[in-house]
Image (cartoon, rainbow, N blue to C red):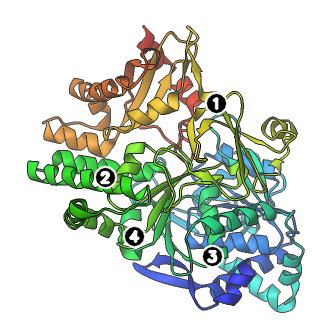
């Protein structure tokens, strides 16, 4: 697919990134040259077809250049979240048998020395030799260089990225046909990547995905999603997650361009600069935008509030019509033009002015957030899938979607609801299995090829799938009542003042919740109400507790009596990926949180 795309459009822009404050481009031909250099260098270093090569780096252009190069050499890419703790990084390297790792900077290299050196690991390629900080780190450092973290006797293990490319250029002159031979040896059954699922509990499992599975997934998406060479995405999701890489694989097939954001925090500003036509992200990013709009409404004057409320009311009615393939007419059409001019145009301009749709995946999206984007004229389309099925099994489409659902099955993908309500998926995109875990594979993939997702759901008469909860997350109270925590947690975090919520009820007489504050919104509310202090002191303030209590009461009114939150605790800090409380895709690790805050939970039942 990549070779065909390069041949079709060698001089068209494929990749963009910001360097020195200026957006710089890479053509398809240049991407091909760089990937070949990586592949040739791997050959020169003795990395054989089928060997594992890990990438532990932030989302950047170098990442996808390396990924394609690894595959060109017939090797297997093992992505690793750079946010993982050292023990998790070492586990992935050891379990996968990675022979080489491409590391972001000295901080990632430092993790390699926090435990036994992985048995198969030989070389380490370093992208940046120095890491600088805007403020001192825990060790009081403002900068860390490679020389600071590696023992003197280990220097030969390490290669700079630029040195690797030079090795590749020299090898390609000596063996000009080598990469084509390697690439021709790759078949649909060849393993393309080992993706370790972060999981909400237990050790990560390596999902084995083949070239054939990815190719099927890409063709299914290409047949359904209206994307072409004139499109461009802004990418800021971690490339260690299958969803982000899936957008790159789809790009390889369809020919659109990818611009790499400077970071998650700069994504909205980069949107205005890049002017993408579509964006793929996790719900938390969209919910932050929703919270910003909500806070703007609350803090604005009465006139602004009324205009915005009127505009979104009009936009909501137009959105409902368009979801039934109808357009507004008469008075509603006139009102919508004014609503767009007064309110929606500014929102769309902030996103660059060209966005045709946005996609949300990897976690549940609040219905209210989807409705807000649809009302503003920017369809926010929710999809569903697991790493185990290459990232997407279902998707809502711009011309065919239902808010609250995760869409219809992709062509060639089968869906079924088991007797106990679990969602089952089957198709050529389903994984081969878990790496070196036959028992876990047998529990997840049955003899008929159905992938047991662990999610509960229902399918309506038109084939739209609705996810209701995680099967293993169903909480059973001491009275035998079953509570679906995800639904309650999603409702709680609709409040602009709440960042995370975790419901506890398993084996208990009733449900309670641990919540964390949305820092910016709570600080702003506190200033407006004459309250000062850091986040920890605000979390203990009685007026803040009353504010959060109102949000809990609103949610409780939507619940059955046995589901209601009888008590809650506001934690004095947010949950953290670094502390192991959140997965890299920001899902709560329920067991870790319950263990870490056991005393707080017990106090809620006293």
Residue at the image point whose x is 41% and y is 34% from the top: 491
* Tag in front: 1 or 2: 2
The residue closer to the viewer here, 175 or 518, is 518
Residue that badge 1 annotates: 471
The residue closer to the viewer here, 413 or 209, is 413
Query: Do the residues under discs 4 and 2 have CB atoms within 8 angstroms?
Result: no
In primary-sequence order, the first of circles 3 and 2 is 3
Asked if residue 576 lies left or right of residue 463, the reply is left
Q: Secondary structure at mark 3?
A: helix
Per the model, the C-alpha gap separating discs 4 and 2 is 31 Å
Residue 147 in sight here:
no
In primary-sequence order, the first of circles 4 and 3 is 3
Mark 1 crowdedness (10 Å alpha carbons): few <14, some 14-19, many ≥20: some
Residue 273 in sight here:
yes
Residue at the image point whose x is 65% and y is 82% from the top: 31
Where in the figure is residue 106, as x and y percent of width and height? 59, 61
Where in the figure is residue 238, as x and y percent of width and height? 56, 58
Identify the disc placed on residue 317. 2
Asked if 215 appears above or below 118 in the picture, the reply is below
In primary-sequence order, the first of circles 1 and 3 is 3
Residue at the image point whose x is 87% and y is 88% from the top: 177
Asked if 368 appears above or below 177 in the picture, the reply is above
Residue that badge 4 annotates: 270
Residue that badge 3 annotates: 254
In primary-sequence order, the first of circles 4 and 1 is 4
């Amino acid at each position: 697919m990549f070779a065909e795309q390069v041949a079709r459009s060698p001089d068209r822009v494929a990749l963009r990134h910001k360097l020195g404050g200026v957006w710089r481009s890479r053509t398809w031909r240049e991407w091909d040259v760089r990937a070949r250099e990586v592949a040739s260098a791997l050959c020169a270093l003795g990395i054989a077809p089928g060997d594992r090569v890990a990438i532990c780096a932030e989302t950047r252009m170098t990442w996808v250049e390396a990924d394609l190069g690894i595959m060109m050499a017939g090797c297997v890419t093992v992505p690793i979240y750079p946010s993982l703790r050292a023990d998790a990084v070492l586990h992935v390297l050891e379990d996968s048998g990675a022979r080489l790792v491409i590391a972001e900077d000295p901080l990632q290299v430092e993790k390699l020395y926090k435990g036994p050196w992985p048995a198969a690991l030989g070389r380490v390629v370093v992208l940046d030799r120095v890491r600088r900080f805007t403020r001192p780190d825990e060790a009081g450092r403002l900068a860390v260089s490679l020389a600071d973290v590696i023992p003197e006797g280990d220097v030969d293990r390490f290669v700079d990225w630029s040195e690797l490319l030079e090795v590749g250029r020299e090898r390609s002159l000596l063996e000009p046909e080598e990469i084509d031979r390697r690439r021709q040896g790759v078949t649909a059954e060849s393993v393309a990547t080992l993706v370790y699922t972060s999981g909400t509990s237990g050790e990560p499992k390596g999902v084995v995905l083949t070239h054939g599975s990815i190719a099927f997934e890409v063709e299914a998406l290409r047949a359904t999603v209206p994307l072409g060479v004139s499109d461009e995405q802004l990418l800021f999701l971690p490339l260690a997650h299958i969803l982000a890489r899936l957008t790159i694989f789809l790009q390889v097939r369809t020919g659109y361009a990818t611009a790499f954001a400077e970071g998650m925090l700069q994504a909205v500003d980069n949107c205005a600069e890049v002017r993408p036509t579509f964006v793929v992200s996790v719900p938390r990013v969209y919910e932050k935008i929703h919270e910003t709009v909500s806070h703007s409404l609350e803090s604005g004057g009465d006139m602004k509030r009324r205009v915005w409320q009127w505009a979104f009311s009009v936009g909501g009615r137009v959105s409902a019509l368009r979801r039934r393939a109808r357009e507004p007419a008469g008075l509603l059409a006139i009102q919508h033009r004014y609503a767009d001019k007064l309110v929606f145009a500014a929102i769309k301009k902030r996103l660059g002015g060209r966005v045709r749709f946005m996609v949300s995946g990897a976690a549940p999206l609040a219905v209210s957030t989807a409705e807000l984007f649809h009302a503003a004229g920017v369809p926010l389309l929710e999809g569903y899938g697991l790493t185990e099925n290459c990232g997407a099994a279902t998707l809502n489409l711009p011309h065919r979607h239902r808010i609250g659902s995760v869409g219809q099955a992709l062509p060639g993908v089968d869906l079924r609801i088991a007797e106990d309500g679990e969602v089952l998926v089957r198709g050529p995109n389903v994984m081969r299995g878990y790496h070196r875990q036959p028992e876990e594979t047998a529990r997840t993939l049955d003899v008929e090829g159905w992938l047991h997702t662990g999610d509960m759901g229902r399918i309506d008469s038109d084939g739209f799938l609705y996810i209701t909860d995680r099967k293993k997350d169903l909480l059973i109270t001491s009275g035998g009542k079953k509570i679906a925590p995800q639904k309650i947690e999603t409702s709680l975090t609709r409040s602009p003042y709440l960042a995370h919520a975790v419901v506890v009820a398993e084996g208990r007489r009733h449900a309670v919740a641990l919540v964390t504050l949305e820092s910016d919104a709570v600080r702003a509310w506190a200033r407006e109400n004459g309250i000062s202090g850091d986040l920890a002191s605000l979390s203990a303030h009685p007026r803040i507790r009353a504010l959060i209590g109102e949000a809990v009461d609103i949610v409780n009114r939507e619940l059955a009596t046995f589901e209601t939150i009888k008590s809650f605790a506001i934690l004095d800090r947010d949950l953290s990926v670094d502390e192991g409380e959140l997965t890299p895709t920001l899902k709560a690790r329920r067991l870790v949180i319950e263990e870490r805050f056991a005393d707080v939970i017990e106090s809620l039942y006293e």
